[in-house]
Amino acid sequence: MKKIQLFILILCFSAIQPMFAKCMYGSDWTKNGKKIVVCINGDSYPDRNKGKEICEKVKGSSCSSPSTFSSSCANNECYDSSGKNHNSLSGF
């Protein structure tokens, strides 16, 4: 019985995890010496791809896949899922 409960608990957390937004950046996500951080409402492959596309739009050239993730951004080069620039974003 405990194994079933544990399995259900793990299943619930794994189903909830992708709904959390992530702030992401890659090794070459920079513009004018500042790190470009994109905060997206999810962590799926399409979400990461969208973050990469926003980086490329902001940077004006190609960006690597995102490799680092956090829950906030405060470097004046923070971008939301629409590509809008913010001084900081948090709560992700």
Image (cartoon, rainbow, N blue to C red):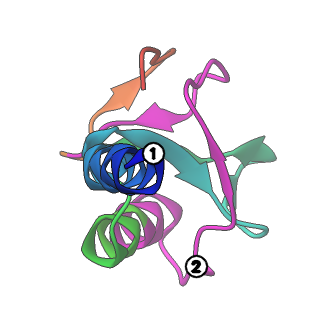
* Label 1: few (<14), some (14–19) or many (≥20) C-alpha neighbours in 10 Å: few
* Label 2: few (<14), some (14–19) or many (≥20) C-alpha neighbours in 10 Å: some
Q: Is residue 79 left or right of residue 27?
A: left
Q: Residue furthest left?
A: 82
* Residue drawn where x is 53% and y is 80% of the image: 61
* Residue drawn where x is 35% and y is 39% of the image: 21
Q: Amino acid at mark 1?
A: Lys
Q: Is residue 33 left or right of residue 85?
A: right
As for residue 69 lying within the magenta part, the answer is yes
Q: Amino acid at mark 2?
A: Ser
Question: Residue 74 appears in which quarter of the rendering?
Answer: top right
First to last magenta residue range: 52-81
Return the residue at label 1: 2
Question: Residue 27 appears in which quarter of the rendering?
Answer: bottom right
Q: Is residue 67 left or right of residue 1?
A: right
- C-alpha separation, residue under disc 1 versus residue under disc 2: 40 Å
Return the residue at label 2: 65
Q: Is 30 placed above or below 44 here?
A: above
Q: Residue furthest front?
A: 1
- Which residue is at the front of the view, 74 or 33? 74
Badge 1 marks a residue whose secondary structure is helix
Residue 15 picture location, percent across and down: 26, 54
Q: Is residue 42 visible?
A: no
Question: Residue 75 appears in which quarter of the rendering?
Answer: top right
Residue 90 picture location, percent across and down: 47, 15
